[in-house]
Amino acid sequence: MLKHIRVVPLAAESLGVRSMSTYIETKDVKILLDAGVSLCPDRFRLPPHPLEFKAIEEARRRIADAAEKAEVVTISHYHFDHHTPSYEDWLSNWTEEDKTAKQIYEGKTVLMKNPKEKINFSQRRRGWMFQKTGGKYARKLEVADHKTFVFGNTKVKFSEPVFHGPENLALGWVLMITIEYEEEKFMFAPDVQGPMSAHTLKLILSEKPSLLMVGGPPIYLAGFKVDNTQIQVGLTNLATVVKAVPNVILEHHILRDENWLKMAKPFYDKSCKTSCKVLTAAEFLGRKNLFLEAMRKKLFGEKPPSIEFEKWMHGGLKTKKHFKPPL
C-alpha cells in the first residue's frame, strides 16, 4: 500500500491478542508504536485459552525483535495493551519483572503522552510509575502531545490529546500519530473507537493519510458498558473515514466480538463503493485472522486444555500472575 514507509503490525486482535503495536521504518528512522500487548484475564467467565497464551508469547517475541532495531518508541496512552509495565504478570501482560520493559525502552527516545495533563487518574498513576520503572532506562523521555519531531526527511506528528472513544467520559485521552515521508502518510489512531468523537474524525480527515490504522468501536460492550447510540456513531464515522482514506487497517476493540463483521456491514458497503481497501492487521500481513478472545468460549469447548492447564486455571489470581501457564 505504501512504497516508502514500511508498516509492520506486530500484535493485534486479529493476531490473537489485545494490542495495536506496530513497527514503522523509513530511510531516516525506525519507530516502535505502542509497545504493549495484553490478554483479557476474564472473558465469558474464563481465563485466556492456551492458544491465546501462545499468541501473546509470539507477540512479545515480535515486539522484542522490533525493539532491538527501533530508535524511537511511542506511548499513545497508558493502558497496558499500549505500553509495557515493569512488574511480573504472566496472566494478562506476559511480563517478567523489570526485564521485559527494560528490553523495550532501554537506550530509546521515548515519545509519550503527557502523564500530567489531559489524563484520567488511573493513567496518571501508570504514567508516573512508567517514568520510575521502564522509562528510567530510556535515553530520553519526551512529552509528545501536539508536537512534531523531524528525523531527516521524516516527520512524526502527534495530535493533540483526543478522547478515548466518546467525548467527556472517564476513559481519558490518547494521542494519534502521523508519519510522513516522500509524500506518503501513515496515520496511527489507537483507541479512538471509530472514531466516536466528531472532533477526532475531523482531525483524521484533515491529515489525509495514505494509510490509516484505526481502532474500531467496542461492539462487544454495546448496551453493557457503552451506549448503543455511541456504537452507531462510531460505525457511522468509520463509514465517513472510508470515503476519504484509500487504505484502512481496522483493528482493536471492534474485533473482540464474533459478530463484528455483521455489525460493520454498512461500513464495509461504503468501502466497496469508494474503492477503499479495508484490512485487519493479519490480512495486511497476508495471514489468517485469529480472533481468539472473541472465540474463547468456543475454544474451551472444541480444544479443551490439558489437565495441567486446568489445575493452573483454578489457582488463585496471585498464582496465575506469578507462574507461567503450562502450554
Image (spheres, helix red, strand yellow):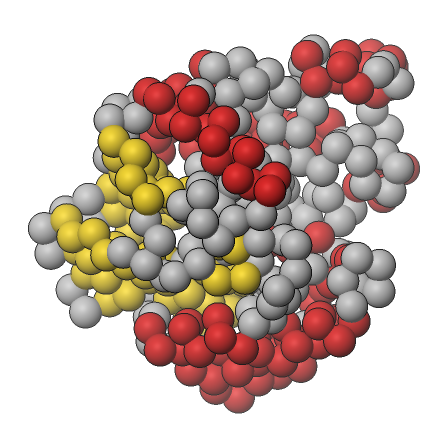
State which quarter of the image contains the C terminus.
top right
Q: State the image coordinates of residue 206 (x, y, percent, origin top left).
A: 35, 78
Judge from the rendering whether residue 157 lies leftward or rightward of residue 160; answer left or right.
left
Q: Is residue 271 visible?
A: no
Judge from the rendering whether residue 312 lies leftward or rightward of residue 230; answer left or right.
right
The residue at 41%/46% (across/down) is 113
Residue occupying the far bottom of the picture: 273
Q: Is residue 181 visible?
A: yes
Q: State the image coordinates of residue 282 (x, y, percent, origin top left).
A: 53, 51
Q: State the image coordinates of residue 71 (x, y, percent, origin top left).
A: 24, 35
Tell which of 295 and 131 is nearer to you.
131
Judge from the rendering whether residue 190 lies leftward or rightward of residue 206; answer left or right.
right
Q: State the image coordinates of residue 212 (x, y, percent, origin top left).
A: 42, 65
The residue at 42%/72% (across/down) is 204
State which quarter of the image contains the N terminus.
bottom left
94 w.r.t. 247: above or below: above
Residue occupying the far left of the picture: 152
The residue at 57%/53% (across/down) is 172
Picture quadrant of residue 165: bottom right
Give the number of callouts: 0
Tell which of 32 and 62 is nearer to you.
32
Judge from the rendering whether residue 22 lies leftward or rightward of residue 80; answer left or right.
left
205 w.r.t. 111: above or below: below
Tell which of 269 and 203 is nearer to you.
203
